[in-house]
Amino acid sequence: MCKGMIGYVSLISAFLSTFCAIILFSVSLKKNHPGLIRFGRGALLLASVFITIAALWLFYLLVTRDFQSMYVASHTNRALPLVYTLSAFWAGQEGSLLLWAWALSLFTAVTLFVDKKNDEFAIYKSLTLAATLLFFLFTLMFAANPFQRLSFKPVDGLGLNPLLRSPGMIFHPPTLLIGYAGFTIPFAYAMAGLATGNEHWIYRSRKWALSAWIFLSVGIVLGGWWAYRVLGWGGYWAWDPVENASLMPWLVGTAFLHSVMIQEKRRGMKRWNFLLITFTFILVIYATFLTRSGILSSVHSFAESPIGIFFSTFIVLTLIASLGLFVSKYEVYRSRNIFEASLSKEVSFLFNNLLFVVLTVVILVGTTFPLISQALRGFQVTIGAEYYNEVTVPLGLVLIFLMGICPSIAWRRANIASLKRSFTWPIVASMVGLIISPLLGIRDFVGLLMVFICVFVVASHGLEFWRGIKAEGKTKGFGYVRNLWRAVQKNRRRYGGYLVHISIVIILVGITASSVYDSSRMFTLSRGETYSIEGYTLSFEGVKVSEKADRAVFTVSLLVLKDGRVIHEATPSIEYYEKMEQYITRVHIHTVGLKDLYVIPLEVWEDNATFKVKILPFVNLIWIGAFLMLASTVFAMTSSEKAVLKNQDLKGNGR
């Protein structure tokens, strides 16, 4: 069997195994035969094995530089380092879709081992996962085959896109795709729960949803980090269509993670939770469609391909199946009426959810508008960043403000006394922040509003930590630390969530400060000339030209002085890839504490060069806050399911 056939035959085998599993599960629903269910589980596990073989085979083709493979020849060459040769697996459309299917197959296998029961719930869950896996295998076989062979063997490949030769691209695409695939699991649990009337699906899917959310968050953060360090424009988010595509399921998924707490605590919003996780999954598929189809113009997207019709069909069929099931079970899956008063934690959670959804709709309209204009007018009209900023910033500020209210407001009904007790000190702290702000140079309205909201959120959460300490009994000195530890250990999920909220405030401060208070200059220097900006003096020392295996590199030497003393040598560069006829700018970033000196070479000659230099204050709070957010989420996940179920008023499946 030739090299190309091994991978493709593995895909065919996985497709047939998955199809057999669907048949066996479907028949078992009618005949209730345990043997059929076991065979169905075995067929799904076998499909996972075949997909793993296909994935490992693609790795083998890449490592052995088999340039007769169209995928290998398109994304690697002999000069490419091994680490980027391996990351070429997900650099192209076909490989990234194979990674999606591989991750889903492994997740499916894990659910089969974890959920040992062969009941109706397990059948519906497995059917949903198998149907999704079948779609990806079908797409790989007929529209995005990573194992196509050339009729000849090139001496060398085209090489990897230079923009993808970055540590960020080693980790960003796989974490994003794993997050996408991971959200299939809670969707499958939701479909099974709705079909069987079993509301316990939210407990069984909670850690899956959190895990998928973590991977998606890491992918988004790494994408921003890559854009900041590699694209060379001095920013980390540009409202690019592919960036938006990953943000939309993150927003709805975040709403779901908040909303399930209402179902856990009060047995409410059951239908709403099903809709949230359903549309999270739909948006995950839509995001994959936007990125992989090449239908929209983006620095991240792939070339145009025929997979668009495959994804469009799957999205429509999924909507019909899921919403059809929702309508058929609408009365059966009724929630208790939990909104007893307009001032309550339940209502604040509802507003929280609605804001997440509205934000998603706003971004969806802006992202999809080019497709609508293409269909109606024959060309794409792109919506600029101004639209997103004008609409999302006010909504985002309200959402952040709600973060400070939700943890402290009472369940069922809040009275005036409890509101005073919960919010007096946070408001006082916010007013103090407003008074101090002008002394720190913050005088504009947006900056003052941000100070008020951020201080309010941090203070309200700090008060919750203080209440936890006091609940552990009277103490003094280091006893406060001991009490805090005890409180956090007893409810990791709650306090982990509080830390996530504080982390988001840190990220928000970093975004605002680096965007509103940045300094930017463009200038040209000849050898020996200097330029001063924000206390820094930059001295141009010259240009060094070096020839690499596949590119010419023009490296600039720029001494950075402060108070007349050299503190750093900046070495930004411009690389020219002759085979691709492509210029790539390599920026230089000098970090001092939370601030970055960002140097972009625009044009380089022998004795002079043109630069754009930015000073970005507090920009590193974004990465610090993101790390804390992810660590806090992992910490929250360590709470056991027994702790989640403890003291809940949910008993059985009754209404």
Image: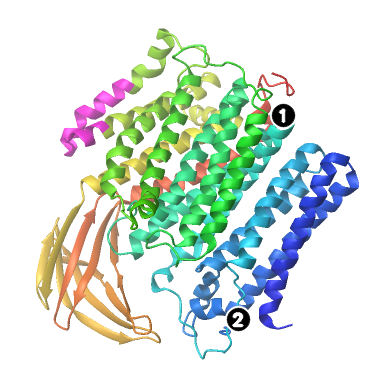
The numbered mark at residue 149 is 2
Residue at point 22% right, 45% down? 516
Residue 130 spot, x, y in % from top left: 71, 52
313 part of magenta stretch: no
Q: Nearer the viewer, residue 482 or 7?
A: 7
Residue at point 80% right, 47% down? 25
Compared with 60, 135 (above or below) is above
Q: Nearer the viewer, residue 94 or 534?
A: 94
Residue 9 sits in which quadrant?
Answer: bottom right
- Mark 1, secondary structure of its residue: loop
Distance between mark 2 and mark 1 Cα atoms: 49 Å
Indicate which disc, 2 or 1, sits on the residue closer to the N terminus: 2
621 relative position to 479: left or right: left
Q: How many marks?
A: 2
In the rendered structure, which amino acid carries the disc numbered 2?
Arg
Question: Label 1: which residue?
Answer: 197
Can you see residue 118? no
Compared with 191, 644 (above or below) is above
135 relative position to 86: left or right: right
In magenta, the rendered stretch is 427-449
